[in-house]
Image (tube, grey):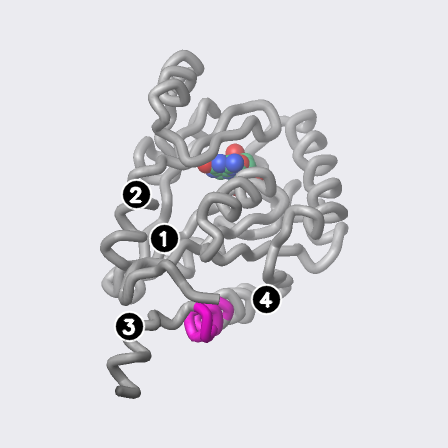
């Protein structure tokens, strides 16, 4: 199998997990100053969900209303978009194209449907599912977070259970259990490095230059 990737072109890392699985913390750790310096970026989605306390427009998400979101869909702005829980979420297409063209690593935090859709469009993207260590741990994390009403939390818990029980059917390539944050981040990094070293991702032109 040959790769269509240009030498040095960027990587897309798709991270998905049920609510409370810890992917937001993992993404924050992954995107530390050192890796930002090396060209790692976080894909900032658009959402119709209202901001939580402490969230800033343009940092965690671009917060937009329903009509704006629908207009953006029509304009082809999104690489994928889905309703998750009770709101709409979408990944902007342009930053993905830029990273593929110019290099770097783009980390995405999307739901299982978004991950599947993106993998279909970008087959050389890396897909990682983050599992909490147990259902009890997941419930505890959701409760401790305290960012949702009891009803919203129950909905997220039910959705989380469903995702944990069905994620294998969405075609994820790697699974990381988030029991210890440091270990989980190391595992995600190892996956990205190992994936990059796979022979089918090695640019044929570069190989030719080395061996000829
Ligand atoms: P939250 O409201 O907790 O920030 O996110 C809810 C869910 O939406 C999470 O599972 C998160 O991964 C997912 N999500 C965030 N952005 C996107 C996106 O652009 N596309 C899709 N499909 N899911 C997203």
Give the quadrant of residue 179: bottom right
Earlier-in-chain disc, 1 versus 2: 2
Nearest to the eye among marks 2 and 3: give it: 3
Q: State the residue at coordinates (70%, 60%).
A: 133
Is residue 2 within the magenta segment? no
- Indicate left or right for 14 with 100 as reference: right
Q: CA distance from mark 2 to mark 4?
A: 31 Å
Instruction: Name the disc covering residue 205, or none.
Output: 3
Give the quadrant of residue 163: top right
Position of residue 172 measured from the top left corner of the image (x, y, whole percent): 61, 54
Q: Label 1, on which residue?
A: 106
Earlier-in-chain disc, 4 versus 3: 4
Residue at the far top in the pictured view: 67
- Indicate left or right for 159 with 49 as reference: right
Earlier-in-chain disc, 1 versus 3: 1
Q: Label 2, on which residue?
A: 95
Q: Label 3: how many residues lie within 10 Å, few (<14), some (14-19) or many (20+)? A: few
Is residue 196 within the magenta segment? yes
Q: CA distance from mark 2 to mark 3?
A: 26 Å
Q: Label 4, on which residue?
A: 180
Q: State the residue at coordinates (56%, 57%).
A: 128
Q: CA distance from mark 1 to mark 4?
A: 24 Å
Disc 3 is placed on an element classified as helix
Position of residue 144 measured from the top left corner of the image (x, y, whole percent): 62, 44
Q: CA distance from mark 1 to mark 2?
A: 8 Å
CB of mark 1 within 8 Å of CB of mark 2? Answer: yes
CB of mark 2 within 8 Å of CB of mark 4? Answer: no
């Amino acid at each position: 199998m040959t790769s269509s990737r240009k030498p040095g072109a960027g990587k897309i890392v798709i991270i998905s997990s049920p609510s409370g699985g810890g992917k937001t913390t993992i993404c924050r750790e992954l995107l530390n100053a050192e890796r930002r310096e090396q060209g790692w970026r976080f894909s900032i989605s658009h959402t119709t969900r209202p901001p939580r306390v402490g969230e800033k427009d343009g940092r965690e998400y671009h917060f937009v209303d329903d009509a704006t979101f629908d207009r953006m869909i029509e304009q082809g702005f999104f690489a994928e978009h889905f309703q998750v829980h009770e709101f709409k979420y979408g990944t902007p297409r342009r930053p993905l194209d830029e990273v593929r063209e110019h290099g770097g690593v783009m980390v995405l935090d999307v739901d299982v449907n978004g991950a599947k859709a993106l993998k279909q469009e970008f087959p050389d993207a890396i897909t990682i599912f983050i599992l909490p260590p147990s259902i009890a741990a997941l419930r505890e994390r959701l409760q401790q977070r305290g960012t949702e009403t009891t009803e919203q939390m129950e909905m997220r818990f039910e959705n989380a259970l469903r995702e944990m029980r069905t994620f294998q059917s969405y075609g994820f390539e790697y699974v990381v259990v988030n029991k210890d944050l440091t270990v989980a981040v190391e595992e995600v990094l190892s996956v990205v490095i190992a994936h990059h070293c796979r022979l089918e991702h090695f640019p044929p032109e570069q190989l030719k230059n080395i061996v000829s």
